[in-house]
Amino acid sequence: MKMTGMMRRLVATAMVCAAPAIAQEGAPQPQPLPLATAKNSPLLVSADLRDGMDLSGPWHYSIDPFRSGLAGFHGEVPGVSQQRYLDLDVSKAMRDDNRALFEFDLSHSPVTTLPSSWLTEAPELRHYQGLMWYQRTFPAPAGRTGRYFLRFGAANYATVVYLNGKPIGRHAGGFTPFAFEVTGQLRDGSNQITIGVDSQASEATVPPPVTDWENYGGVTRGIRLIATPGTYVDDAWVHLTRDGRMAVQAHLDGPRAANAAVHFRIAALGLDVAGTTDAMGDWRATVAAPRALVRWSPEHPKLYDVTIAAGSDTWRDRIGFRTIAVRGADILLNGKPIFLRGISLHEEELGTDPTRAMTPAAARALLSEVKDGLHGNYVRLAHYPHSEVMTRMADEMGLIVWSEVPVYWLVAWSNADTLATARNMVAENILRDRNRASIGIWSVANETPVTDARNAFLRTLVQDVRGLDDTRLVSAALLVERSQGPGAPVMTMADPLADALDVLAINTYNGWYSPDRLADVPGIVWRVPAGKPLVFSEFGADARAGFHDIGPAPQKFSEEYQADYYRATLKMADGVKTLRGMSPWILKDFRSPRRQNPDFQQGWNRKGLIAETGQRKQAFGVLAGYYADRSEGSEDATQHRR
């Protein structure tokens, strides 16, 4: 079923994102802040290309380990007394000798630079998980007309926002954008914005508390004050249908959204299509693709300037056009079989002190290692939606992207709020990035043990993906069952979710976490469904850069062992008939507090082919050579020449 502009409001349901408070008899009962979800808040699709004020830069911050800014000094229900933590004129109150009433004074607190994570702000915050307050002032534009929105690229995990001391809204989820309209709350002159971000995970959050990556708390992506006309294009999607026609749909928001004239244009193709919105502000059209259209591909990542004009608003984006589909065990890009030569990647810059504040330069540096260094055409952005800076750079550089939500390991499968949160993440991720040609695969999960509750949970997410975007492939990184055959281990995919997916994906670590000798890995037998393409979504081995074998036998954590592991696993992969791609784990070493081996890890997962310093390990060359061979001549995965 296709998802219309109106139906997107039905995708997700609300989840309380602030710390819960216990109601006390006689205490003031505050009105709950509006929760930003894909169904009830501004989408502002392609907001990064709209005019606005960048609120990046210096912000005051203050730790709040007991969450008293949300729940009061004694943990009471937040209400009138809460104003003393967010008051606009704390300095005046202090001059009046009332400073004992104020545990916070953000205007005199230390200063950090946003976007960033507080984990890198000070040594004492390195492992802090909890609530942090940020505050700054900014001038409202003079002579304001139209509408204004505060738009957040992402903040991890639960966020509450106040403008001029008044509550604006809240959001749950650490990796997708959200926005609040503030047209009526702005005032002439200086405006104060206060943000509370709580990074503490719980059994009900997505992801849950136990992960294998760094949980960077803070406002990790940009904040902008965006201006639009009174009626504006809130959502737009321009793409090729599976049969190669060009489709466009748009949703207008505002008092003149109904029965409004719209114009869709791609000047470079001479395309100009006019139409009128319906009573709900929606418009859609499908036309023949112009003959001059150059389809996007890793070899030719052509992008076009696209506009949709409605009244005084003009929505803009840079979009590439291509089709992606499956036929039997093949993945087809623009109708031709392709083998996905990829790598997995966490959202951390190269460097020994990453902050998860992805800049275009940082994104280009990482993706250049994939595209130019490894001869890749594909990247798995794990284990959560990465910054739109990254997906736009993948568009520009020509890399197919696997994008996923952090439904990871043991989430609360039977918790209705957890499902609502995951569904909202799926919606926010897809609605943000449907116009990115690079996105080829939406993933709904990673390494989730099979249960009936899990199966129902993930099938709901798969159904949501297909409703929001029927032009891309759906997958999930699955586990397999291991048994001993007569001559070699047998790996069997028996996951019941497989029949709901377009692309089967398996994480496998034979020879690292298994008892297999590397010499035996190439002979491992794989039993997977024959009629669908398979991707090895993960495989890998740790190595500390600069650590080498000191004897004739390979030693784990050495560069030589990691390189031999890759040679053995790639030989194994060559024997899997339906394999159509791989994204080994992982491009670069990344922060993981659970990894505390004092000799080799020191808080880092060392499975990267590149150290955090940028040094390439020996296995980098092994995979690069394999992909260089794969990329010669035909892209057809069934014709791999060794």
Image (tube, helix red, strand yellow):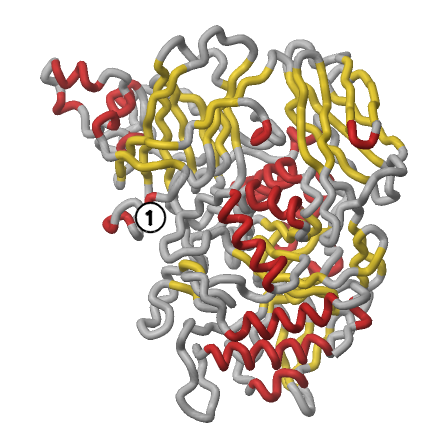
Tell whether 278 sits left or right of 16.
right
Q: Position of residue 221 (x, y in %)?
A: 46, 38
Q: Helix, strand or loop at disc 1? A: helix
Query: Where is 77 relative to 203, above or below?
Result: above
Instruction: Kindly tell me whether residue 537 is visible in this rendering.
Output: no
Q: Is residue 325 visible?
A: yes
Q: Is residue 25 left or right of residue 561?
A: left
- Image quadrant for the C terminus? bottom right
Please indicate whether residue 275 sits to the left or right of residue 556 in the image.
right
Q: Quadrant of residue 565?
A: bottom right
Q: Residues within 10 Å of mark 1 (few under 14, many from 20)?
A: many
Q: Nearer the viewer, residue 52 or 260?
A: 52
Q: Residue at x 70, y 14 (%)?
A: 257
What residue is shown at x 67% (from left), y 80% (from top)? 571
300 with respect to 536 (left or right): right
Q: Position of residue 394 (x, y in %)?
A: 63, 48
Which residue is at the front of the view, 84 or 114?
114
Q: Residue furthest bottom?
A: 552
Question: Can you give x and y, in whole percent of width and height, for residue 76 in the image?
Answer: 27, 29
Instruction: Work out which residue is located at the far left of the displayed protein and give it.
Output: 97
* Residue designated by label 1: 119
What's the residue type where badge 1 is placed?
A: Leu
Give the camera-side residue of 500 and 516: 516
Name the residue at 68% across, 69% down.
Answer: 628
